[in-house]
């Protein structure tokens, strides 16, 4: 237990530049408190003591603003930065070395039964306010940009951006774990492509109108 706690504290120090001391992380970081509460709740849940599990879980929600269902499966070195508004559903599965930010939802769509929530591989980063919904599979080392809504599977080593999220491959190079700014936006790229296409069509229409005007003037009989 203490080895896992030390590992969690080291994880926070490695990923959060603002983390000053182990004591500060242990006592003041809501993400770490929520994860510790989840592990206790999960222990009761796996042994069929559902009421105790949910009591611990809901108590943690009131104290941290982070809701993790006791039935979720979470790997090691899981880091929740800031954490307010994070929701993780019952059948969610999360690998090792995953980082999520405030406002993230790993939820269901309301249409599925059984496995209703996402599966995240190892090394995944989910940006602030992003929503990953349904029993989708997110591959290892995936980066999901802030505010994105993911409704489909994402392959490993990819970046997802937009609503609904689209995949952007970065030539096999991983995006920096904590950089949510310098990420190509495929939605804006598509808008620019359409704008260029509209300009090309306008130029063609202008040229065609000029040709029609010139042909009309040549066919007009001179007035005698």
Image: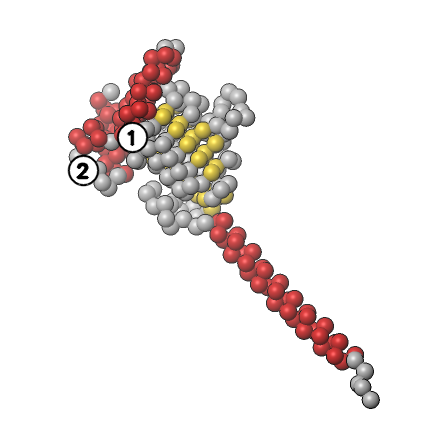
Q: Residue at position x 32%, y 43% from top?
A: 178
Q: Quadrant of the C terminus?
A: bottom right
Mark 2: few, some, or many residues within 10 Å (few <14, many ≥20)? few
> Within the image, what quadrant is residue 203 found in?
bottom right
Where is 187 relative to 84, above or below? below
Q: Quadrant of the N terminus?
A: top left
Where is 73 relative to 150, above or below? above
Residue 181 in the image: state x and y as whole percent. 37, 48
Q: Which mark is residue 119?
A: none
Tag 2 residue: 20
Specify the farthest residue to the top: 48
Q: Residue at position x 61%, y 65% from top?
A: 202
Label 2 element class = loop
Instruction: Look at the image and tell me whether residue 140 can be seen.
Output: yes
Label 1 element class = helix
Query: Is 47 displayed left or right of 13 in the figure?
Result: right
Query: Is 197 displayed left or right of 133 in the figure?
Result: right
**Separation of marks 2 and 1 at Cα, in angstroms:** 15 Å
Residue 190 in the image: state x and y as whole percent. 52, 52
Query: Is 183 displayed left or right of 77 in the figure?
Result: right
Sequence-wise, which precedes: disc 2 or disc 1?
Answer: 2
Residue 41 in the image: state x and y as whole percent. 33, 17
Tag 1 residue: 31
Q: Residue at position x 51%, y 35% from top?
A: 151
């Amino acid at each position: 237990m203490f080895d896992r706690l030390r590992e969690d504290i080291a994880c926070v120090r490695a990923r959060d530049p603002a983390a000053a001391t182990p004591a500060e992380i242990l006592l003041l970081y809501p993400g770490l408190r929520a994860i510790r509460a989840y592990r206790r709740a999960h222990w009761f849940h796996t042994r069929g003591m559902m009421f105790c599990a949910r009591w611990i879980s809901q108590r943690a929600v009131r104290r941290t603003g982070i809701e993790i269902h006791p039935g979720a499966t979470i790997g090691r070195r899981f880091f929740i930065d800031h954490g307010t508004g994070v929701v993780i559903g019952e059948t969610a599965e999360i690998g090792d070395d995953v980082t999520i930010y405030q406002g993230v939802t790993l939820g269901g769509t309301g249409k599925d039964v059984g496995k209703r929530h996402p599966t995240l591989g190892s090394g995944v980063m989910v940006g602030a306010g992003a929503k990953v919904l349904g029993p989708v599979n997110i591959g290892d080392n995936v980066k999901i940009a802030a505010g994105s809504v993911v409704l489909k599977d994402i392959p490993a080593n990819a970046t997802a951006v937009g609503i609904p999220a689209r995949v952007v491959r970065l030539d096999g190079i991983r995006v920096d774990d904590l950089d949510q700014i310098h990420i190509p936006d495929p939605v804006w790229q598509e808008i620019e492509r359409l704008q260029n296409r509209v300009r090309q069509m306008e130029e063609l229409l202008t040229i065609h109108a000029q040709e029609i005007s010139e042909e009309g003037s040549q066919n007009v009989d001179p007035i005698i």
